Amino acid sequence: MAELVSITIDGHGVDMAQGSTILEACRFLDIDTPTLCQLDNLTPVNVCRACVVELEGSRVLVPACSRQVEPGMQIQTDTPRVRHSRRLVLELLASSVDMTLTSGQVQGWMQRYQAAPTRFGKVATVAKPVKVDNELYVRDYSRCILCYKCVEACGADAQNTFAIGVAGRGFDAHISTEFEVGLPDSACVYCGNCIGVCPTGALMFKSEYDMRAAGTWDESRQAVTETVCPYCGVGCMLELRVQDNSIVRVTSPLDHSVTSGHLCVKGRFGFEFVQKRGPRG
Amino acid sequence: MLRGVRHGARLIAVDPRRTSSAEWADIWLGLDVGSDIALANAIARVIIHDGLPDTKFIERSTTGYKEFAKKVEKYTLERAEKETGIPRNAIREVALAYGQARTGMICWTLGITEHHNATDNVLALINLGLLTGKVGRYGCGLNPLRGQNNVQGGGDMGAIPAKLPGFQAIEDPAIHEKFASAWGGADFPLKKGWHLSEMFEGMERGELRSAYIVGENPARSEADQGRAVRLLSGLDHLVVQDIFLTHTAELAHVVLPAGAGWTESEGTVTNSERRVQRVRRALDPPLGARDDIEIICELAARLGVDFGRPTAEEVWDECRSLSPMHAGMKYSRLDELGGIQWPCPDESHPGTQFLHARLWKDPVEGPLAPFSAVDNEPPVDRLTDEFPIRLTTGRRLDSFNTGVQTNEYTSPLRKGAEALVISPEDGANLGIADGECVRVSSRRGSVDVNVSFDRSMRPGLAFMTLHFPDQVATNVLTIDATDPKSGTAEFKASAIRIDRIPASSSLGGESQARPGEGARL
């Protein structure tokens, strides 16, 4: 049994198991904390800085997602300094990146911190053409906030394929395959675990991309059903998102014990056979 | 597995091919196809000679050690090197690594089981687990990694000749009586049935005259495909229940269109770790296709028995009432716990993480675990001057079995058609170029296929998949020599010859030509 560590967050005392993060303590106390680069099935890289909190005795704000609890920590999550920092992070990201496809939760944080990305005027953006080089998924790096989640999922945290990494420096930094080759010429094995972790819609099923382009993507007509992948004995749980009796996206729950949300190419994309309908179907 | 490697686990890959797993391994043992028992027995001998067996565990929890030790004594490193093609030092290194490790698991797939001596192969691996006490505890165990989402569940539910649901013996009168009375005094045989290979033998003898095939494509998936198609075509009556009009369904007198099990039906499947999980209906099946349960109940009604119209949950609850190891797994618990590992005898039981933990109880609960003295038996299809190359078959990451499901999506990994994968050295010896179309022949038939050179292949070894049977009928080549205990055919070991094709002759995709017709090199 791990030892318990007592800390205080926004005046509330809480005992957490040793090795827990400040973020976990915040969640335990139902303190909604913005995160973009953090995911429970990935190692924290603390690059986005959306989750920063004020720690007594610390010169700078600390990232809640990766900082582990220490005895006696006094933490504030809603001071003007924290609010200002979170607002600026969200504004800077949204000023240069198209964040319109982020989740409702992210939109909620933008509102809560009154982020106004347009206040910088006409600024540099990362906009570039969408990469469509295979039938399974597209990469729209105009929507990429460089959270590194895809790189982690492709690498040591899940797939161990290392098809993508961060290339370039400063504002030119971007996610890339080796030598910028197209996916079919890269090491990619099309597990789609990068899509599963992408928070901004930069990585997307081609079917979803095409439907959005055609204006037929309609979440109000979609339902999600959990089932088990048919293809091997591992037993990965699938979340099938279905619109008009067709599967339009496949994900896997992060909290499932079998593969923590990660899939392979067959489980992620191999569903077409059930949609092959005869003339009467 | 790679997560384990990242956390410091040592990985040893045993495979004739240098697979992507082998590339991650600390040690790769590239053994000759069908020499697994020679390797396992030699490893056991090293462990015994170096004083590494878990003697306390062997004494308390196992039987048959003496006979086993006597058997493996004959498997010296010299002999194993000769029979497996692996350098003796590498065998010794692996034996010491496994023998000295505090924990260690052995995982295998069809490379062990698609052989004429499949059961003996598995027993040889079980011996290693028992010898070192690496069963029934954390980080240990013997794990067959299943190739479909419900291979385990099919067996659990009694889709094997000698068992009823929950591995209860059909020939045990008390068990028989329990099921018969639950099923309203139903009269069913007190005798075990046939497994797949025995059924085909029954067809050959003319004893089996009709078949009802559910969700299987034996006209493409059976070894020695020509024979399988001939026997299925000769039946008096063939019923096929499937989600597609497969090649097997095309041979049928009656086809019953079914819904896809994992997305058009409700029910459960059981994964490799014995975890029973729920599958749910996300799509409506195509017009005319029905749920398997509905089809079976309708069929029963036509035969004069009223099964009613049970839901999947009601069928499952009946199973729970008859199979003690599933008794505690009601649907709501499966939902809540994300699946439960059997045995789960009651509704307060959390499920069982380690199946054989009982062997560590003091005193041991249940029967002791037997060692099995087994010998190496090389593949049935012998290599000769006429058929000098060993063909082994397998799968690729993005495809599944005969391709009925996976050929429907566009995988960027699927570059070109099916290929005969061989080493560049063999290509040079045979005077063929990478990508050239060649004729591959075994003692059973020939196919034309393009060659692909791959450095992961050792000279003398060739590899093909069965994913594109309409383009390249790989199972025309494979041998139907089967393991008498499990009924599995030796898909992993055929003897073949590779011939250049004279410019004027082509067999086309699906050839049944006899060997000897191609120009011999």
Image (tube, coloured by chain):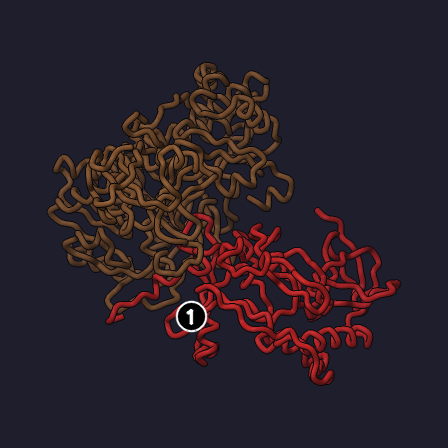
Q: Residues within 10 Å of mark 1 (few under 14, many from 20)?
A: some
Q: How far from the left and from the top, in percent, is residue A126?
A: 64, 73
Does dot 1 land on a helix, a strand or a loop?
strand
The residue closer to the viewer here, A47 or B473, is B473
Q: Is residue B209 left or right of residue A246?
A: left
Check the image and name the residue furthest to the front: B503
**Residue, disc 1:** A242
Q: Is residue A19 left or right of residue B208?
A: right
Which chain is assigned brown? B
From where the camera sits, is residue A272 visible? Answer: yes
- The spot of residue A36 in percent (x, y) is 66, 67
**Dividing the picture into quarters, in which one does residue A30 lie?**
bottom right
Q: Quadrant of the N terminus of chain B?
A: top right
- Residue A41 visible in the current orientation: no
Q: Is residue B53 above or below residue A22?
A: above
Instruction: Report the residue at 20% width, 49% height from top.
Output: B212
Q: Quadrant of the C terminus of chain B?
A: top left
Q: Residue at x 35, y 57 (%)?
A: B407
Rendering coords of residue B150 (x, y %): 38, 49
Residue at 20% x, 36% y is: B517
Question: Which of A160/B270 is in front?
Answer: A160
Chain letter behind tag 1: A
- Residue at 43% across, 38% down: B424
**What colour has chain A?**
red
* Rendered location of residue B73, percent (x, y): 47, 15
Q: How many marks?
A: 1
**Amino acid type indicated by mark 1:** Val
